[in-house]
Amino acid sequence: MGKTILKVDNLKTKYITRYNEDVYAVNDVSLEVEEGKSLGIAGESGCGKSTLALSLMGYYFAPLHYVSGDIVIDGKNISSLEPDAVRQSVLGQEIAYIPQSAMNALNPTRKIINFIEDVVLAHEPNSDKKEIRQLAETRFELLGLPKSVLDHYPVELSGGMKQRTVIAISVFLSPKILIADEPSSALDVSSQKMVIKMLLDLMDRGLVKAMIFITHELPLLYNVTDDIMVMYAGQIVEKGTARQTVFDPLHPYSKGLMGSIIVPEAGVRNSKLSSIPGVPPNLKHPPQGCQFAERCKYVVEECKTHEISMRPAEGDRAYRCIFGEDVLRKAYNNG
Amino acid sequence: MRNTLKSIFKDGKFRLGFGILVFLLLMIFLYPLFVPNPPLEIIGRGTFFPPGVYVSNLDSVSGAPIYSLTLADAEAKRLASKLSLEDRAEMKTYLLAVGVPEEQINIEDTAALLALWAEKYDPKLNVKGMIFAKLQYYRRLNDKLVSLLDSEGLILARETDGVLEKTGQVLPLDYVNIGEVSSVRVLPLGTDNFGRDVLTELVKATGVSLQIGLIAGSIATAIGLVLGLISGYVGGWLDDLIMFFTNLLIVIPSLIILILISYSISQSERGPTTIAIVIGLTSWVWTTKAVRAQVISLRNRDHVNLSKLSGHSTASIILRDILPYIASYVVMAFILQISSAILAEASLSILGLGPKTTLVPTLGLMMNWAMIYQAHILGKWWAYFPVIVVIALITFSMNLINTSLDQIFNPALRE
Amino acid sequence: MKGYWKYFRKKLLWLLITTIFAFVLNFLLPTLMPGDPVAGIVSRLAQGMSTSTGVKEIYENYAEQFGINKPIIEQFFIYVRNVFRGEFGVSFTQYPRPVSDIIKSAVTWTIALQLPAIIVGWILGNTLGAVAAYRKGPFDKALLPLSILISNFPAFGMAVILLVIFAVRLRWFPTSGGYGFDMIPTLSWGFVASVLHHYVLPFLSIVLITIGGQAIGMRSMAIYELNADYVKYSRFMGIKDNQIVKYVFRNAMLPQLTGLALSIGTMVGGSIVAETIFSYPGLGTTILSAIKGQDYPLVSAVTLIITIMVLIVNFLVEVFYGFVDPRIRATQAE
């Protein structure tokens, strides 16, 4: 067992809409990432996985608001800190973020080096610009990026180069944990590969200690991460190792999700392609009981009335369903 | 669709704008039912009669039943209205000259001033340093004041063969009921420089200006829509050509083109419709640009590609797969066109290039007349201020509607 | 820098094309309309002249100058040549003053009035709009409808209202003119003071109108920028809010410059009309009296000058914009 880098307990955050309605997009999420490990979070679009990424940063701005729960990074609880303390000493240094699309992630009218200066100065106001430049040059070279990038404006870079620049900036202050929200989905195949390679490289070089990887592309998760969590309607519905979750899903939603993709593994390729009928529930008025009940093939009356909590399963994994794992496996085998 | 309409009507800005517009429209349609007078009828012999209720003097003296009312302040009011500010100031000068301390003189208080005057004025006194003409003036002023004070009313007489025969008398206590005077005309906004009823004229002008806006807006939107669709959907050299002219016309001030065209059309042919058409023909550029941008973003959407693959004709794709998606933008552009056309007409008219017609007024023409006759310098606010207010209300309401539609159709602008 | 020069050359070419187009429009529109402008000119000039030989002489004189008997293409080149020599003919209303002379003084007044007013209005409007977008809340709620009201207020209406309140009622400022009617334009203190005194109201009315429109544009731009991805990313990198606000305002402000370039024509149009309300000795009042007096050479010259002024300002703004916004250079370099 490695050292725990990130531990999240019962995190709950909400959006407040302009009509003053509360939408709980992250509901009671707990997770743990150990040193040297990577965690993948999967789910349909709108399941709250991007919001979870934002919520994990511990720094909230409208319309997203913190409700309850703890975020502990390397033993330090950041949920109890003042927002400005989080900004000053946590963001970028302890935990860093790679946005969904790098296309617009950088201020178009600021040169890369100036932005890096802004980042460093925001944390250490007395830094010397010359030193920052030197550091940036070394770091960019280390990550295989040309130093000339530093003197360009973001608009002058290609898509893949921009994404790699964003990653280099994100880890510039050597954060302990990196959260990547669909870092490659907007790129072409070869750029995607380079970006993924770069992310894995970061872990190998020890620039980051752990990583959370969010995507809707399951094959990617399976190939890149150690553990996978499946999210549905703001809740975690299943967590386990990548292999367990992909090849032996327990929750009916995970089962449907895995069934709807082709995983390039011999055994799975033959299984039937299926997609899950229906749409996720409206989080403004979440249903009572199981969130997935409306779409579940195996639903029983109790699902709609009982609050369902996570239950442990064999092999150090957990899932959120009223049925035991044997019952589920049997049902899946029968089709 | 229904939900969209609902959320549109929920929006405060939209409701305000829509409310103002409906009010103006009701005005245009209902007012003529109650006041059927021709809008350009010249009723006043003179310029700029102030707003108020005009009562026939003859009818109130000879036609209406007389009532006697004893009102305590009637005399003071009568005196006050006859004693001009200049007279009061002159009285003060005299009183100061004969040695009355300044703090005792209050020219606002008519009764006190008259009492003081009666006490201090001496026609025989030669005030030191006062010229003869001035003394004569005070003598006349005193005579006027005396006649004011012991007024026994007026005697009405009829002249027959050079002899006056008394037929009646108007006493200070005589009153008539305004409802019983046979000829009364309410002029809520007075008359203009030609002696025409401003309110009636204004209502008509609002209608005509809106019509100008509607015609010009329709023309501009139609041209802009067609060119934008061609430019955006067909593309190629047609796009280049259309965009070339659009960009040219964007940088050249449209008012200048309007001036050139209007100046070149002979005066007699420059009716409101002609002006509307000219405005419409010169203001389509922004619509073209907006429509084109929208069409380009739609051109490669899945549903359009599907229709293309299914072999639908270009016309049918534009009609069924493109137009419905840009309808909201076109409506917004149309609203803006109407309001800017109304402003353009007003600007042209102020420069003397508006519709040259004596048959109908427009808001711009009313403004032009008021400016030529210096209503603003002379303090005749009723001739120009209501016009500005109406123009501002029209453009304000339309832009308010537009902004609120924009916020509903462009969620990024919310919050 | 390579991208920039490409951009600059493109804009310069565009300035040339638009200028040619302006010439064509200015020449063609009156020519195409029914009626012979020279005949109109002569009928004006000949008023009070009894001998038909005199009228004929004038007609021939003008026909010569405008080349009225020659083919239309040649007429156009004669027109362009005349303009470049500064020969716009002789004004009828201020006969025998040459049109170029009248215009020269009016242009100075108009530029001195409108350029500072539009710049000040632009800066104030953008600041207000940006603050509204950032602060949101009641400030924004009040500012937006107010800006819509003011920006759609006709420029002449604003001028009239300011005039009535501050000149007619309060008598703080004079009602008309560019300087005291009893003054002779010299560089004396008295004259400068009088000019400034007359300057305030026309200046204010243009500034106010400009503020409203710019504030609305800036507000939408800034809201759009505030929601941009880079704002979120910068926040998560721990950058301070006031630094981010600086990013946003700069990025929103730059496109507003293009907005300024595009709307300068409309603004000048509105301001020209506002000038007439104050009888300001600029181009607006000149064109008003020229229209009233059927002074064709003067109308034609003023419209051309206004258009060319607008085109040049538009060009300068675009050139400046390309210089300060890297986004432009990048798109050109591709």
Image (tube, coloured by chain):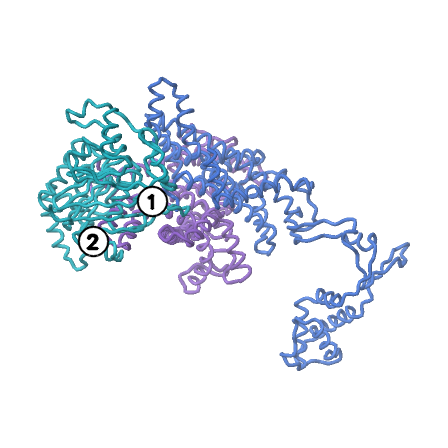
Q: How many labels does the image show?
A: 2
- Asked which quadrant contains residue A273, the reply is top left
- Kindly indicate which chain is depicted in blue in the rendered structure: B
Q: In which quarter of the image is residue B236?
A: top left
What residue is shown with label 1? A24
Q: Which of marks 2 and 1 is nearer the N terminus?
A: 1
Apparent colour of chain A = cyan
Q: Position of residue A201 (x, y in %)?
A: 11, 41
Which circle marks residue A90 in the picture? 2
Chain ID at mark 1: A
Q: What element carries label 1?
A: strand
Would residue B357 be visible to someone looking at this image? yes
Q: In which quarter of the image is the C terminus of chain C?
A: top left
Q: Which residue is drawn at 53% across and 40% down?
A: B353
Chain coloured purple: C
Question: Which quadrant would residue B102 be assigned to in this image?
Answer: bottom right
Q: Distance between the residues labelled 2 and 1?
A: 25 Å
Q: Where is residue B163 in the image (x, y as percent from the top left)?
A: 90, 58
Image quarter (top left, top right, bottom left or bottom right) of the N terminus of chain C: top left
Q: How crowded is mark 2: few (under 14 residues within 10 Å), some or many (20 or more)?
A: many
- Look at label 1 and name its amino acid: Tyr
- Residue B385 circle label: none
- Residue C30 visible here: no
Left or right of residue B89, residue A250 in this image:
left
